[in-house]
Every structure is written in structure tokens, then in C-alpha cells.
Amino acid sequence: MQGYLRSDGRKGIRNIILVTYLVECAHHVARDIVTNSPDNVQLIGFPGCYPNEYSLKIMEGLCTHPNVAGVLILSLGCEGFNREQLANTIKASGREVETLVIQKSGGTRKTIAAGLSNVNELLITAEKAELVPMDINELVVGTICGGSDGTSGIGANPAVGHCFDQLVEQDAICIFEETGELIGCEQIMAERAITPELGEEIMKSVEKAEQYYTKMGYGSFAPGNAEGGLTTQEEKSMGAYAKSGSSKIHGLIKPGDIPHQGGLYLMDVVPDGEPMYGFPNIVDSAEIVEMIASGCHLTLFTTGRGSVVGSAISPVIKVCANPETYDNLSDDMDINAGKVIKGEATVAQVGDEIYELVIQVAQGQQTKSEELGHQEFVLTYKKIEGIGPSCLPTVR
Amino acid sequence: MINRHFVLLNKADNIFVCCKPLFAGDSITLEDVEVTMTADITVGHKIARQAILKGEKIIKYGVSIGSATQYIAFGEHGHMHNIKSDYIASHTRQSKTGER
């Protein structure tokens, strides 16, 4: 395997220039620049005008991601986002960064022209990125599920778990998430923690999720889940939990925290304190974005009902559990885990197939969503506190 | 997999999961006992492996995934009309008008 070496020593599997707008008012200008640029120039952004520590932290994580070579920041000028801090963080990571403020750049037309010229310079720098050997233990792989149904927990999720076990064995960093979709699994999950103190933190994070979702009035449970045969939150949770495989759990992180030691990590995505901004993550893409902000080079996305999304920055590998969905949406699916429920393959065989694809995608092979041009991106408001001292034990 | 239509995920389970659709009226043998489906059963849905009493836990993957809100007969479809979460209520789409 080879990776693009960044100045901060991290290695990427893609070589991307980001154009990021810091408020919806700068979205059109940013999009116009991206639309008129090559494929490896991608659009991300934040819609709101009010400042938010969380969105700044996530944006910093994304703009200094190992897959990213350089960034063009698009600001209207009067929004609350701390563009100076973002630019300084990117600069400190050794990446190229340019900032354009529309109010100071003569408006839409002139800013687009200036942006296109900036992007061209950033692309020239990106081309100079050195390709160096990269080991599996330098990979960070995340997993999420979306559009789950009664087949997800039988085929796709345990197969991803099997793949995770192989990656963790080779000292890669693997991250699973959504404590709200682990309600009901807290006890068995806590028993897998490498220390009892970490186990307690895991229990607390799921209890927090249950309280938070109860206040929201909805569990992390969509109508499609029910149509696909899932009846309760804990049933969905048990299926989702299978994605984590059987390794010990090495740590509990919050979105944007970057683990530095190989192993399996749980991401606590539920906001802290009283609910302030609504649902923890409004949609699957918001979860993928958090995974990427925590360093994921690629994300394994399991689905039963059939999601078609991809992502900016890091490739998404879609693993389809439901054979009927696979037949219907095969152009969008990278892995057919429906073979398990049809009795045509074992979970381990599909897990091996996912593992092989992870390596190929890390070596540059495009996923289905990349080929189709999917670059979904969602970042909204959230309130999170730092993790406690027991969350990242150093003992192995 | 106990036959082409259903899978038993854990020997402690009191439900089977459908892996090939069946229609209401279809008869099938489940662990040597013949039963007729009382509803259409699509992939991913559950049927009772045995009679389940009201209040009894529903066991899938070997663990509880909720409780029966009413008596569920052997072979009957188990879903939101007769099973509830012990944690947090599930919800369905409010309007499906126009959906095909």
C-alpha cells in the first residue's frame, strides 16, 4: 500500500483539495468554484451564522484530514465562524490554505474568479504530494449503518465485524459509533472494554443516549426500519452492534477526537448536557462526517433498505445486507452481503471480501459512490464536552 | 437456516427471521411442526417460534429485544402491533399517501 505523505506525518489514500464555505451565504460561490474544477476538488461547508465550538473542531479535523492536500476557505465576512482559527490550524498542519472573504473580494463574480485561481495553485501543490509506503496499521476505518432492516444484523453488520477483527488484529484503528443505536447493548459492550473504568464510561454514554433520545421523543429508529422488519430500538441496536466485531474496546472518543493507537474505538455522538440543537445527528451523512473528522480514511456503510450516499473527503464502501435491495440497487452497492441470508456465502466469506476491498480502495480503487460522484456532506450544531480520563486507557 | 424461508439466529430465540417471502395462507414446516401463515411475511420480518405470552420477552440473537404486548401464536407475525421496546418507543411514518 502507498499513501500521500502530509507535512504532519499523516498519510492519506486520496489527494483532495477542499473548498469550504463557513456560512450558507458563501455556499453558492464555493459551489460554483468546485463545479468548475477537477474531480478532486470537493465542497464542504457549514450553514449557520452562529459560532459553535463543535463545528469548528469538526471543520478543523476535516481540513487537516490526511486525504486533504489543501483548502480554500470561503467566508461571507460577517458570519460567526472563526475563520482565522480554522486557517491557522490548517497552516500549522503544513497544508496549503487560502481564505477569500466575499465582502472584501468584490462580490460573487470576482470571488469566484479569485477562487478558481486559488484552486489551480492548490492543485499544483497537491500534485507534489509524495507517495510513500503505507501499512495497514496506519489505516483508520469507520463504520456506520443506514436504512437498516431485519437483514442488516444477519448479513452485513456481522461481516463488517469480521473485517474489523482482521484490521484490529493488524493494529489498524477501527471506529464504530452511534451510542443511541446501541441502546440495549450497553452491558455486553462494557464487558469488552480493556479496563473496568472504560466500561463504566461506555455504560454512561449509552445511558446518556437513552435519556437524550427520550427527550427528543424518537429513538434512532426510522419508519423504513419498521417496514424492513425491525420492531424495537434494542433489536436494531443488537444488529448494529455486530459491526463492532469481537475485539476488545480500546477507547471511547467524541466526534473529532483522533485515536493514536491501533484498536477498536466507540464514538459517542450524543450531545452533552440538556438538548440544545435537536437530534444528535440529523442524518447518516452527519455521522460519516464525524467519522472522517476523527481521521477515518474510509467508512464501511451497511444498509438493508438501501442507501446510495457517499461522502466528500473519504470513500464510502456500501455493504448491502438485503438480497432484494441488492438486486434493485446493485449499481450503488460495493458488497453483496445478501448472499448470507440466501445461504450462498458465510459471514466470514463476506467479511473477507470487505477486507480485500478496503485494501483495494486504500490503494486508489474507486468505490461505487465515488464513481457516481456522491459527495454528501452535513455539518450542523452540537454541544460536546471533552472525554474523561478513563476513556483512552494506555494499557493494552 | 431452518428452511429456505426462515433462519434461527440463536438457539435461545423465540422468533425466526424471514429470509425468503411467504404469503398469508402459505403452509410451512417449522422444526417439524406445520403452520399456516396468517399474514404476508417479507424478508427481515419475524414470526414466533412458539406461543409467546403477553409480557414475555422477545428473544433474538439470544438476547431480549422487547416484550410482547399481547399473546403471539406460534407462526404469527411478530412486529409493532404485538411487540414493544423496553427502552424507547418506536415510530412509523405519519403519512404514506401517494407511496407506491
Image (cartoon, coloured by chain):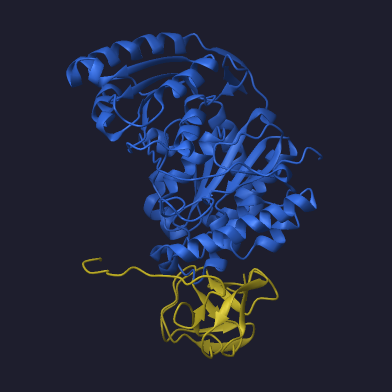
Chain colours: A blue, B yellow
- Drawn side of residue A81 relative to residue A13, left or right: left
Split into 4 quadrants, where in the image is the C terminus of chain A?
Answer: top right
Question: Residue A227 lies in what quarter of the image?
Answer: bottom left
Split into 4 quadrants, where in the image is the N terminus of chain A?
Answer: top right
> Among all residues in the image, which is located at the extreme right?
A395
- Drawn side of residue A299 relative to residue A348, left or right: left
Tally of numbered tags:
0
x%, y% of residue A186?
66, 61
- Drawn side of residue A188 relative to residue B90, left or right: right
**In the image, residue A67 above or below residue A249:** above
- Residue at image position (53%, 73%) is B5
- Residue at image position (60%, 41%) is A386
- Residue at image position (27%, 69%) is B95
- Drawn side of residue A74 relative to residue A90, left or right: left
x%, y% of residue A218?
44, 65
Residue A344 in sight from this viewpoint: no
**In the image, residue A198 above or below residue A122:** below
x%, y% of residue A187?
70, 63
The foreground one among A129 and A308 is A129
Residue A305 in sight from this viewpoint: yes
x%, y% of residue A308?
39, 46
The foreground one among A219 and B76 is A219
**In the image, residue A329 above or below residue A151:** above
